[in-house]
Amino acid sequence: MYLRYYGFKDFPFSVTPDPAFLYLSASHREALGHLLYGAGEHGGFVALIGEVGTGKTTLIRALVDNEMADLDIALCWNPQLQVKEFVATICDELGADYDPREDTTQKALVDRLNAHLLATHAANRRTVLIIDEAQNLSREVLEQLRLLTNLETHKHKLLRIILVGQPELSELLERHDLRQLAQRITARFRLRPLDRQETRAYIQHRLDLAGGSQHLFTRPATALVRLYSGGIPRLINMVCERALMGGYANGKSRIGALMLSRAAMETLPRRRRVSRMRVVLPAAALALVALMGAVAWYPGIQLSRAAGWIGGGQAAQVASADEAASNESSDDVSGDGPDAAGESAEAAAADGERAGSGPEGKDDAPPSGIPAGDADINQMLRLWGVFGSQVQSSCDSLRVGDLRCLSDSGSFAMVERYNRPALLTLQREGRRQTVLLSALDETHATLVGANGTRRVDRRELAGMWTGDFRIIWRSDSGVGLIQPGAVGDAVVWLRQRLARASGRNPAAELGPPSPVYDDELQAELEAFQLSKGLRADGMAGPRTQIMLNGAVPSPGSPALNRVEE
């Protein structure tokens, strides 16, 4: 098929776990170290946990193929067994001597296994039991495992045990009736997905081993692989395999972003797909279409005039926004996120709405629905349940309990992502005005004024909005920035909030949450930032913390509601 076309000696992206193709990322190297520790002289009971497809089985096979001296390994690939079948499987794997016709009881099998372990120990050999898919073990088999850990001499365990499973294994070990077993686990490790750099290196590693050419995948294509797959090696293999088949069928010498995107759409489950339009089309092209649509909305504006308008004032606005983004140290809106292209286009479309009310960007007729007078921070604080306060400080210096204020600029799409009421700055008839936005949908917005609320047209409001806004947010972490290397309660808060944002129960995690900001936490935070269109810098500043708060809403935190008819 494509082997000869691309010059491969072997299939580079087979989904079969092959230790010959093992790529040791930092996480995989540490995981292999835990396996070697578990099988070593002082090993005991080790648990390796990772999502489906992260490479757990490949690591097991790499350990087995290592052929460590003086080590006997029993592999259990099918843990869905009855207790007696389970013990018999261990005996079969180790070559323990027993008679299936006579040794018919569980006790007889355990006695035979104990005798075999004592004999191997006397011969200065170690024995390790590795159980894959351990999340499927029954409670009875887990209890038998606990009893097998009692097989020991005065100084050494006769049987070392390594449990390998999916995150459900963590929840299983947290059960109260299995606490005795959980207490015997001496080392636990969670295998994490590959980051962007590791994904690129992983792809090239497998291409090199298969004998392929250098740089067969373009850099944009490898970046898309990471976004589509989430850094899961099995999904990376699936997408790349399909992309190579497509490249061969279409006579492509290299795999680009378009071919990769098509492969992902055809291969991955629906929930993992990123919108084809958002990934494939450049944000600039989408922005141009959106701007043209905004111009065409208003009669009397010629497309020939629009060309100069787009190239002048709009270009200056975009350049100004890009310059501001490049100067931010944390929490920037980034083009690296899975929806980045779509978000950039949406922001440009919103800019087009603001400028599209006249050929010179001026209002043809100011809307009558805008409340008179200026809204202020105190009015927004009342939505947070703070009454009787007369705050005079600026937004950036606001401190009311754990409430803080963020000044930002962008589009309605950004305001919707923050999902908080916002003070918008308008430009009306040569003067600035501040209004409080409490609700927003595709066509309308609700503004709060001194004399009640007003429902206005979203496009009409966008025509006067400067793009500047302020929002109140709750600093649950107690700090303004959480960065790699930090230690303390804020890091614990970040771990727990990320767990909840991804649908996990923090209470079910293995052991108490670490207060140290390590590489694993940074990778998880960067993935979250990418999913929210923020710069993936691993630094949890106000923008990231607001997004984390929004992912797990708490009582007393007002959201940006839908507009009521």
Image (cartoon, helix red, strand yellow):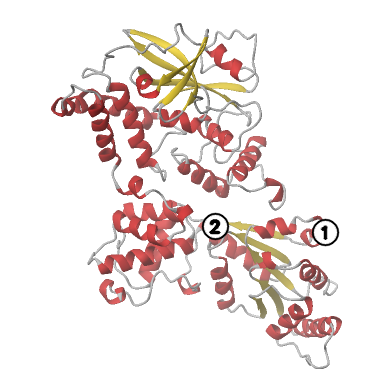
| Between 289 and 134, the one nearer to me in the picture | 289
Q: Is residue 106 above or below residue 43?
A: below
Estimate how packed mark 2 is, as few (under 14), some (14 to 19) or many (20 or more) residues with alpha carbons within 10 Å. Answer: some
Residue found farthest to the front: 565
In the rendering, at what x and y percent does residue 493 appear? 64, 37
| Between 189 and 282, the one nearer to me in the picture | 282
Alpha-carbon span between mark 1 and mark 2: 31 Å
Q: Secondary structure at mark 2?
A: helix
Mark 1 vs mark 2: in front: 1
In the rendering, at what x and y percent does residue 255 appear? 29, 60
For the N terminus, the image quarter is: bottom left
Q: Is residue 470 left or right of residue 124?
A: left
Q: Residue at x 80, y 71 (%)?
A: 144
The residue identified by callout 2 is 27
Q: Is residue 320 visible?
A: no
Is tag 1's residue or tag 2's residue first in the polypeptide sequence? 2
Q: Is residue 501 left or right of residue 368?
A: right
What's under tag 1, amino acid-wise? Asp
The residue identified by callout 1 is 177
Residue found farthest to the left: 304
Q: Is residue 524 left or right of residue 443?
A: right
In the rendering, at what x and y percent does residue 61 appear? 56, 74
| Between 427 and 191, the one nearer to me in the picture | 427
Q: Secondary structure at mark 1?
A: helix
What's under tag 2, amino acid-wise? Ser
| Between 448 and 267, the one nearer to me in the picture | 448
